[in-house]
Amino acid sequence: MASGKEIRNKIKSVESTRKITKAMEMVAASKMRKAQDRMRAARPYSEKIRRVAGNLSHALTEYSHPFLEQRERIDGVGLIVVTSDKGLCGGLNTNVLRLALGHMKEWDAQGQRLKVTAIGTKGLGFMLRAGAEVISHVTGLGDSPHLERLIGPAKVQIDAYMNGDIDVVYLAYTRFINTMRQEPVIEQLLPLSGDLVGASTSNRWDYIYEPSTKTVIDDLLLRYLEAMLYQAVAENMASEQSARMVAMKSASDNAKSVIGELRLAYNKARQAAITTELTEIVSGAAAV
């Protein structure tokens, strides 16, 4: 059995750790509320433009944008992976990276070359270790998404799609469901299809474009890509703070349990030492 001094040192160490995890839990809870408000505020716009863009893919128009054209053969795949910059958020990053890795193996088995854009330090490190071709990345986004920092790395994927280097672009991120549940998803970003975004396919849509068809469609699809990317990062940040709060609360609770067990062990060791000392005193008195 460990000595009383060793047990006291362990108790102090665990108590210090518990103070840190409790503080991180409170910080994450504060950031979580802000991240959730930001994410929920952006959802109506992203869902609406997603639906409009999906209806546009079925519209009767003389102008066909490359983002709307389904290619017969897929030789190259683009993947945008959204992860966090920091850890201590449970299995958040592990789950989305595991999902992405499963798709990467499928694409590799089909002979499709992969180009990756990593948003977040964790995803960048994983893709480099996995040997994937990382053509662009952005890290250090902070606690709120900034569209101007996301456009550059995403444009590399869009340019590769326009040049024919890749034929489809996917977006992998963690969707926020509630504080206790976050879901890793991979969605097809390009080419756009009404079937993928929940648009109605029962009829062919027709629109009146002003000032011109090309101007409206080009701007609309650009806004669509920006909205999808921003929303994915906002969802991932809300999921990150929620997962970190839950993980830190679990760590604090576990530390409290460990402290209780250590104190019980300390009391047992102290009682054993007292009993031993009394036994020695009684034995000495009896010998006299």
Image: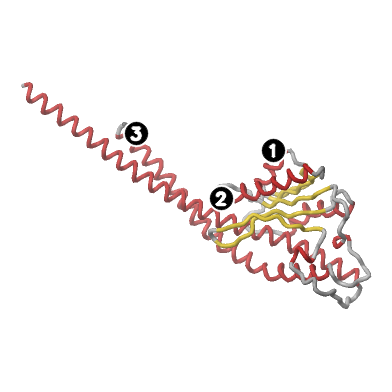
Depth-wise, is mark 3 or mark 2 nearer the camera?
2
Q: Do tag 3 and tag 2 residues touch (Cβ < 8 Å)?
A: no
Kindly identify the amino acid type of the residue bearing the numbered disc 3.
Glu
Q: Distance between the Cα atoms at labels 3 and 1?
A: 41 Å
Q: Which residue carries the number 1 mark?
A: 129
Asked if residue 288 is positioned above or below residue 10 in the image, the reply reads above
Q: Which mark is residue 218?
A: none
Q: Residues within 10 Å of mark 2 (few under 14, many from 20)?
A: many
Image quadrant assignment for residue 222: bottom right
Is 13 displayed left or right of 219 in the figure?
left
Which mark identifies residue 89?
Answer: 2
Q: Where on the picture, by quarter, is residue 32? A: bottom right
In the rendered image, residue 189, in percent from the top left (x then y), is placed at 77, 58
State left or right for residue 69 relative to residue 116: right
Badge 3 or badge 2: first in the primary sequence: 3
Q: Quadrant of the C terminus?
A: top left
Residue 238, percent across and down? 60, 59
Mark 3 = which residue?
Answer: 6
Disc nearer the start of the sequence (2/1): 2
Disc 2 marks which amino acid? Cys
Badge 1 amino acid? Arg
Q: How packed is label 1: few (under 14 Cα within 10 Å), some, or many (20 or more)?
A: few
Residue furthest out toward the front: 202
Name the quarter where the N terminus is drawn.
top left
Q: Badge 3 local density, few (<14 within 10 Å), some, or many (20+)?
A: few
Q: Residue at x 70, y 53 (%)?
A: 172
- Element on which disc 2 rests: loop
Query: Mark 3 or 1, which is nearer the eye?
Result: 1
Q: Are marks 3 and 1 in contact (CB under 8 Å)?
A: no
